[in-house]
């Protein structure tokens, strides 16, 4: 059946961690492909909550080899802390986790730069997670980055740091630039971890593909935060759609057999940028509280909005989504009123497609239809067990996106899931 790509279809936080964990029950290899410790993938397994930032969510399934692919921005400090937490919870990572030697490192100087850039934006902040992601990818594309594999040779690391020193020079207004001797020492401190865990992940995934192993690509963030196709500049600095999973894993595009798009039954956004269907009170607070809509990485309150079918349809078509995993349908139960945006209007005219310019998107007024509500979902085991309103809500999503329903999540645990396809 080919490789399964799992991506977020909205502005992140759709519940990808849980979906990856469920799919990995029947997988051999899982690959994180892009983004970095800005992600926070939550999985509740055996009564315990795990928030994973860099390690693939498949680590909680013993049968799975976990790969941090070439497109990931690797923060070794964050990774070490995550490995400690997993060890403390009794999760074995040694021999099961391979970090790409091609992946770029997020260095302390990138986190400093992220903070300084956000501070200098004044009223036009992006609202980044301050994890150094943008500055790390900037250096990657300027060919100034330090890669995981560079740590393995003191000469190579020296050369790479010299190139960086030359390019950065002194800091603004004659202030000293970043201390690259400190950066060298930082890299040295993580050398044992890199020696133990790094490898040629491209060969690893291509060999697995050749042996017909079941491979899952774990996306991070959501398509509307994509650097090329999202709401630029209010986006992250990587390709968050299926394109990013291909380039960040090293697998050929033709290997992708299934694109499972993860979507919440409503939308959320954390950080700045337009959110056309942002909810009014009291729904905003009710959904935030009931859905625990606070950032898994930063703890920031998420902005909540009604389901936006214009944005969802765009994400499904641009990624060739074959089936949908719908999460948090339970959060909408008992809300008393439900709206779904099925079109945008601007200056009294229908907007034909999801706008490419953020200023145009900010001017879009959603055209809502009212959806039937439902009181409680209970513990459905089949679609037919759902309340009629919930069933019709899902049927409408499938009809408008022309995608089949692949999975339904109705609660935080592994068992609160209906698998509707293999
Ligand atoms: P950065 O990725 O830290 O540079 O942040 C850029 C934008 O992407 C900000 O609006 C962040 O809030 C958002 N963002 C980054 N990672 C995530 C995520 O995992 N979930 C939701 N939003 C994210």
Image (tube, grey):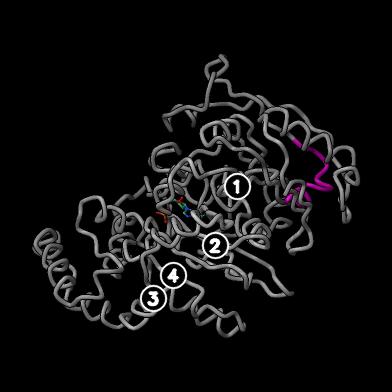
- Bounds of the magenta segment: 328-338
> Badge 2, how many Cα within 10 Å: few under 14, some, many 20+?
many
Are dots 2 and 4 in contact, CB under 8 Å?
Answer: no
SS label for mark 1: strand
Image position, residue 147 (x, y; %): 28, 65
Residue identifier under label 4: 98
CA distance for labels 2 and 4: 11 Å
The answer to which of marks 1 and 4 sits earlier in the sequence is 4
CA distance for labels 3 and 4: 16 Å
Front residue (pair 204, 419) = 204
Front residue (pair 411, 274) = 411
Question: Is residue 128 magenta-colored?
Answer: no
> Badge 4, how many Cα within 10 Å: few under 14, some, many 20+?
many
Left or right: residue 99 versus residue 13 is: left
Residue identifier under label 1: 268
> Badge 3, how many Cα within 10 Å: few under 14, some, many 20+?
some
Image vertical order of residue 274 relative to residue 310, above or below: below
């Amino acid at each position: 059946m080919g490789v399964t790509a799992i991506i977020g279809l909205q502005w992140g936080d759709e519940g990808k961690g849980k979906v990856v964990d469920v799919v990995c029950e029947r997988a051999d290899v899982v690959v994180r492909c892009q983004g970095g410790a800005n992600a926070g993938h939550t999985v509740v397994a055996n009564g315990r909550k795990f928030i994973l930032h860099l390690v693939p969510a498949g680590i909680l399934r013993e049968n799975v080899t976990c790969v941090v692919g070439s497109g990931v921005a690797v923060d070794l400090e964050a990774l070490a802390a995550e490995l400690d937490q997993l060890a403390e919870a009794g999760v074995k990572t040694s021999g099961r986790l391979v970090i790409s030697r091609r992946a770029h490192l997020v260095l302390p100087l990138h986190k400093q730069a992220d903070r300084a850039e956000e501070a200098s934006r004044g009223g036009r902040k992006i609202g980044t997670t301050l994890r150094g992601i943008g500055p790390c990818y900037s250096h990657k594309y300027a060919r100034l980055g330090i890669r995981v594999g560079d740590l393995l040779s003191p000469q190579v690391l020296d050369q790479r740091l010299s190139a960086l020193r030359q390019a950065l020079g002194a800091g603004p207004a004659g202030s000293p630039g970043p201390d690259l001797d400190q950066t060298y020492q930082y890299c040295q401190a993580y050398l044992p971890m890199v020696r133990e865990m790094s490898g040629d992940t491209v060969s690893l995934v291509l060999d697995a593909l050749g042996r017909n192993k079941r491979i899952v690509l774990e996306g991070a963030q959501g398509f509307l935060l994509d650097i090329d196709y999202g709401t630029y500049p209010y986006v992250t600095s990587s390709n968050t759609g299926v394109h990013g999973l291909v380039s960040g894993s090293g697998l050929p595009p033709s290997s992708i057999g299934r694109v499972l798009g993860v979507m919440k039954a409503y939308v959320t956004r954390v950080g700045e940028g337009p959110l056309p269907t942002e909810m009014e009170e009291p729904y905003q607070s009710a959904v935030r509280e009931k859905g625990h809509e606070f950032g898994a990485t930063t703890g920031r309150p998420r902005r909540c909005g009604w389901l936006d079918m214009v944005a969802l349809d765009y994400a499904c078509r641009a990624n060739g989504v074959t089936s949908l995993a719908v999460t948090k349908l339970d959060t909408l139960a008992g809300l008393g009123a439900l709206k779904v945006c099925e079109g945008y209007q601007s200056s009294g005219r229908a907007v034909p497609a999801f706008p490419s310019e953020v200023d145009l998107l900010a001017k879009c007024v959603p055209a809502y239809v009212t959806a039937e509500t439902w009181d409680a979902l209970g513990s459905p085991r089949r679609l037919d067990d759902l309340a009629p309103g919930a069933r019709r809500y899902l049927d409408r999503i499938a009809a408008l996106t022309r995608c089949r329903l692949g999975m339904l999540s109705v609660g935080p645990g592994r068992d609160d899931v209906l698998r509707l396809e293999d």
